[in-house]
Image (cartoon, helix red, strand yellow):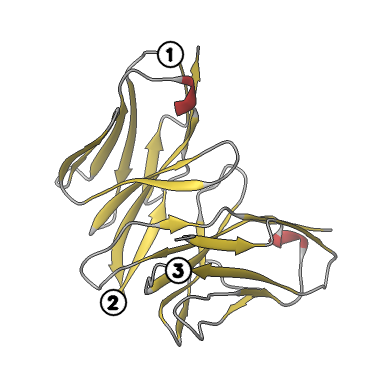
Amino acid sequence: KNEVEQSPQNLTAQEGEFITINCSYSVGISALHWLQQHPGGGIVSLFMLSSGKKKHGRLIATINIQEKHSSLHITASHPRDSAVYICAAQGQVQGAQKLVFGQGTRLTINP
Amino acid sequence: NAGVTQTPKFRILKIGQSMTLQCTQDMNHNYMYWYRQDPGMGLKLIYYSVGAGITDKGEVPNGYNVSRSTTEDFPLRLELAAPSQTSVYFCASSYSRALSTGELFFGEGSRLTVL
């Protein structure tokens, strides 16, 4: 079993739909990252959170530390949101911060 | 700021050749990382560095070497290229401490093919 599991692996939706991507982790963490990888391959950081909720534009990330679960929501989805979304759990190993990545969720938003 | 710069973006190697992937960041980040991404798989850590002069192995270090002589640069060396090293490589950096972490910044990736 992977230490970080994402669901679904693939998601196709129509423009305007509300999107939820889930991330469950089994390791103790100091932070949880959400990343976006565009079709061109580049990776950008969307959120880094250790508790509660963060919002940036149409994107919302939440985390429940007790349940070891995080969600990424996209409101009013748009075709430009089509990308692979990756969660990564950051924990401390031997005094250094290390990340464990999920396999990613491929999101396709159709016009 | 340029952020994290990786070169080259694409490279084809023959089995047994050597090469170095360059990575430079201009954000004065202490942590730097090298990851590889294989199709359908999550990013795997090859090596990381918590500061100049300090490097350590990640999950998949075999066949690679790194050095960190300055805060800015973290090159990844492939000594004897093998087909199993065909992958997309990402360099990343962050400012992190033992009990807290900063946002990750990634380079654009380097697609390496070993034939």
Tell me if B20 is positioned left or right of A71 in this view.
right
Q: Are marks 3 and 1 on the same chain?
A: no
Tell me if B77 is positioned left or right of A19 in this view.
right
Q: Position of residue B56 (x, y in %)?
A: 46, 79
Q: Position of residue A93 (x, y in %)?
A: 31, 71
Q: Look at mark 2 in the image and give the residue it sits on.
A: A95
Rendered image quadrant of residue B112: bottom right
**Subunit bearing disc 2:** A
Rendered image quadrant of residue A72: top left
Disc 3 marks which amino acid? Asp
Q: Look at mark 3 in the image and give the residue it sits on.
A: B26
SS for tag 1?
A: loop
Query: Does residue A51 appear in the picture of this structure?
Result: yes
Q: Residues within 10 Å of mark 1 (few under 14, many from 20)?
A: some
Measured along the vertical axis of the image, is residue B25 above or below residue B87?
Answer: below
Mark 2 against mark 3, which lies toward the viewer? 3
**Subunit bearing disc 1:** A
Q: Are marks 1 and 2 on the same chain?
A: yes
Disc 2 marks which amino acid? Gly
- CA distance for labels 2 and 3: 25 Å
- Look at 33% across and 39% down and name the residue there: A23
The disc placed on residue A15 is 1
Mark 3 and 1 residues: CB-CB less than 8 Å, in contact?
no
SS for tag 2?
A: loop
